[in-house]
Amino acid sequence: MATKIDPGTADFASLVEGLALKGRAAQRKLAALSSAAKADALMQSAAAIREDSAAILSANAQDVADGEARGLTGAMLDRLTLDPNRSESMASALEAVASLPDPVGDIIDSSTRPNGLEISRVRVPIGLIGIIYESRPNVTADAAALCLRSGNAALLRGGSEAAHSNRAIHAAFVRGLTASGLAPEIVQLMPTQDREAVGAMLRAAGLIDMIVPRGGKSLVERVQNDARVPVLAHLDGICHTYVHSAADPAMAREIVVNAKMRRTGICGAMETLLIDVRFTAAADLVRALLDAGCEVRGDLRAQSLNTQVVSANDSDWGTEYLGAVVSVAIVDGLDAAMAHIARHSSNHTEAIITDDPGAAERFLAEVDSAIVMHNASTQFADGGEFGLGAEIGIATGRLHARGPVALEGLTTYKWQVRGSGQARP
């Protein structure tokens, strides 16, 4: 288990350097392990999490009580809270990752040059990955599992609101590592909650190979602005659902309510509903959201659908509510919907509901977000739902990886060249 240090006497640059050097040394040995050895370590860690479930839930109860006393929002408390089902889901996620194909060593492509040189690109681990996250203690297990399976070491820095939970989960995971004969330094947890430790991680170029932030806008902005290390991140989850004129009303109602209300605090929750002006059951969609306990903020045409719809202002279209609030706009067709998305989207997840295959294919092809869906809830924007076992985050940029980042997204590649005595003329 990570030992807390006194922030008043801490040299954070030296602390991070020491942790990073240990992690890098452990990673070099990890990279040479077989797929079976890595899978066994994950299975051992899953068993340890199950065995320590009572201790993990007790630690989490302390975090939740502290969070309630500090006035955390409902969305934050939902992300923070563990229960027996969520604890079991953490263990099951580790087993799922263990069963996934190991990407390390995969040959991406290969060719033979006219001079006989055989050239191939082969997947390799990135190295030491720093994960800075807030609220969700399950990230401790998910991130550790994905890094281990892909041959990377991890340096974890969780939020103070989940400190007790993170320590308990990390202790169980490390117990699984040592039971399988692996070095505990493969997955290290930052032993302090001081914000200066985050700054030291962001400045650790040459020691940490990539930073992955998971949390609120202020955290991600700080990481992106201050990092001297490559960053893989998304800033907001401003997700749209567009109900096309050819949408089935019953399907649209079910998907829209689920996309918004299943879990309002996740990044894949719908924040803006776009309704085609020719869709005849628009009022029913609004009524279903209101009946589900959602506040609806709309443009003038949306307000005309129900007297309970309040006026949306300009900032609503760019707001990630992470709560039971949705903005609704009536749009003049597919082109107008895509234009609205292009103007206000954070490039996370967008969905179209329609029975018109032509409209669906245009939407899928022309909307430039990391995840684009047809006739499905945006709440499926999740690595587990995509068959990836778990995810380390959802990337909304255009480099290296997009959408749910799992094993493949945590690898890079190197060129291997095999010759038979060639010398360049």
Image: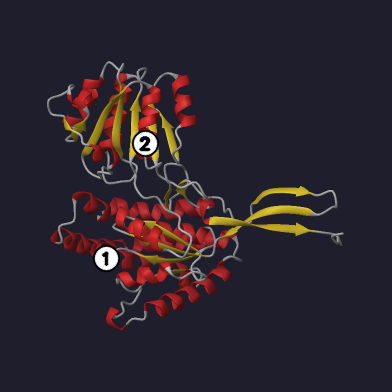
Identified at 29% across, 78% down, the residue is: 7
* Residue linked to disc 2: 343
Marks 1 and 2: CB-CB under 8 Å?
Answer: no
Rendered-image quadrant of the C terminus: bottom right
Q: Is residue 278 above or below residue 137?
A: above
Q: Is residue 216 visible?
A: no
* Kind of residue sitting beneath label 1: Ser
Give coordinates of residue 194: x percent, y percent: 29, 72
Tag 2's secondary structure? helix
Q: Would you call the spot at circle 1 few (<14 residues within 10 Å), some (14-19), or many (20 or more)?
A: some
Identified at 46% across, 65% down, the residue is: 228
Numbered circles on residues, count: 2
Q: Which quadrant of the structure image shows residue 239?
A: top left
Q: Which quadrant of the structure image shows residue 175?
A: bottom left
Q: Is residue 121 above or below residue 261?
A: below
* Kind of residue sitting beneath label 2: Arg
Closer to the camera in the image, 35 or 47: 35
Tag 1's secondary structure? helix
Give coordinates of residue 296: x percent, y percent: 19, 33
Give coordinates of residue 150: x percent, y percent: 53, 58
Which disc is residue 405 wearing?
none
* Residue linked to disc 1: 160
Q: Earlier in the sequence, mark 1 or mark 2?
A: 1
Q: Is residue 221 left or right of residue 420?
A: left
Q: Is residue 244 left or right of residue 95?
A: left
